[in-house]
Amino acid sequence: MQSSPAMAGREAGGGPAPAPACVLGIDLGTTSVKAALLEGTERGLVVAGSCSRETQAYTSSLEAGPQGMEQSVRRIIKALNECLAALPQQQLQRVTHIGISGQMHGIVFWKKDKGCKWTEGGTGPTFEPEEVSHLITWQDGRCSPAFLSSLPLPQSHISLATGFGCATAFWYLKKSPDFLKSYDAAGTIHDYVVAMLCDLKKPLMSVQNAASWGYFNCTNKSWNTDILEKSGFPVHLLPEVGDPGSIAGTTVCAWHGIPKGAKVGVALGDFQCSVYSCLTEKTDAVLNISTSAQLTISMPLGFQPPETPDPSSAVTYFPYFSGDYLAVAASLNGGNVLAAFVDMVAQWTEELGLQVQESAIYSKIINAALAQNDSKLSVHPTLFGERHSPEQLASVTNIAVSDLSLGHITRALCRGVVENLCSMLPVPRLLETGVRRVLGSGSALARNQVLRQEVERVFPFPVVYGKDVDAAVGAAMVMVHRK
């Protein structure tokens, strides 16, 4: 890991060295916000402070109904402000660079001149959202397969899917055009934060986030403007695009004690930053199971993705850093499937006139599954479909009377989550690319021993945990290595 330039034992004159500079990393995730401070020491980079807050930002969608998945930007920024207020003020005052990542694919709209208002808070100036829409997230389901098939084909290696920013904008164009007239800027939630911090007159988006929106050509780093304009798409809402790791601007005023003029990087994909925080060898595969699930390998130097998308392919090539790509099996079914199962059990117990906390249910079903070494049940857990097969439903087969306990069902469900991901990027392909070990990460994997057991059963490689996969730390590391 590269050391911070601020590291110095003592000045040439023999006096005490100045306090080392700090780098702030922020991740605006699907369910929580995290901030991490990195500081240079004689031992290298260390995390000098971190904080996370649940956003509790989900809200109803007036236009899309139950298919819509939207979040309140105000609640997200509130959680961000709480995180920063909890970090050590002494280190915040030494921040020179800020790296920001967040949940990909989603879109938020705002007014350029009225996107936020700056106010004085307890730890210094901060901003509050003003004329801003809800965030329509990557989980949004308003764009049906029929609707997507009515849209022009993109000139991109990535297939269009519901929850992608450009698909959502098309939906508003066709279903609620007056909505778009209220705004003159758009971006991901993390693009919005960068634009507010730097007072950008035109939003700036990294190649990583642009690719996640659809209608973006990674080879020539440009939007499919000709294709979009012919369909009446509001191309004026599309952000400018910069390279991952580049500087978007500087803070226009002090922010929670961070000095005015701190450099802010162009917003990055949370997925890429998570990988960046742990991937040190090209022979490693990264397995992440959080809300969703991903299995990732590095592509060889010089790899270029195909020119046209393959809608049936379960593997997507994500732009990484310095022109490199990751091959990613990105499943929509991970910890959210287990959460849905717990919710179902809680609902059943309530219908039976019992009251059990969901946290208690989770621990009990995991303990029950640990008592069962195996289960003949076969669970195909695609409760939320998959991007390459959006209409796919979940199923349970091979049901026998002997395997109906909560323990058997929970173990089969955990195995199904892992096997589903492995079917998207099979073991033979991992072997072909020289994978030697799997780095296991993610909140669902960390808290679920049964899931870890099934990972070790499915993959014929050593599985290493505790690699501190962390998008906020990764975003900060990018800024350290590129400043």
Image (cartoon, rainbow, N blue to C red):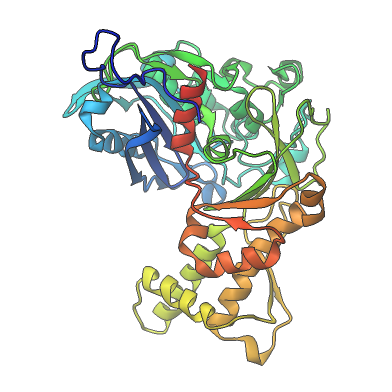
Q: Could you say which is closer to the camera, residue 386 or residue 411?
A: 411
Q: Is residue 109 visible?
A: no
Q: Is residue 128 visible?
A: yes
Residue 106 placed where, x, y %? 55, 36
Q: Report the residue that reaches farthest toward the left.
A: 122
Identity of the residue drawn at 69% across and 52% down: 386
Classify 453 as above or below 305.
below
Residue 54 placed where, x, y %? 36, 48
Write down the quadrant of residue 215 in the picture. top right
Classify 435 as above or below 79.
below
Q: Could you say which is closer to the camera, residue 74 or residue 51?
A: 51
Identity of the residue drawn at 66% across and 52% down: 437
Q: Report the residue that reaches farthest toward the bottom.
A: 401
Residue 237 placed where, x, y %? 57, 19
Asked whether, in this view, residue 137 is left or right of residue 425, the answer is left
Identity of the residue drawn at 35% across and 72% down: 357
Identity of the residue drawn at 64% across and 91% down: 402
Q: Could you say which is closer to the camera, residue 335 or residue 272?
A: 272
Q: How many marks?
A: 0
Residue 294 placed where, x, y %? 63, 49
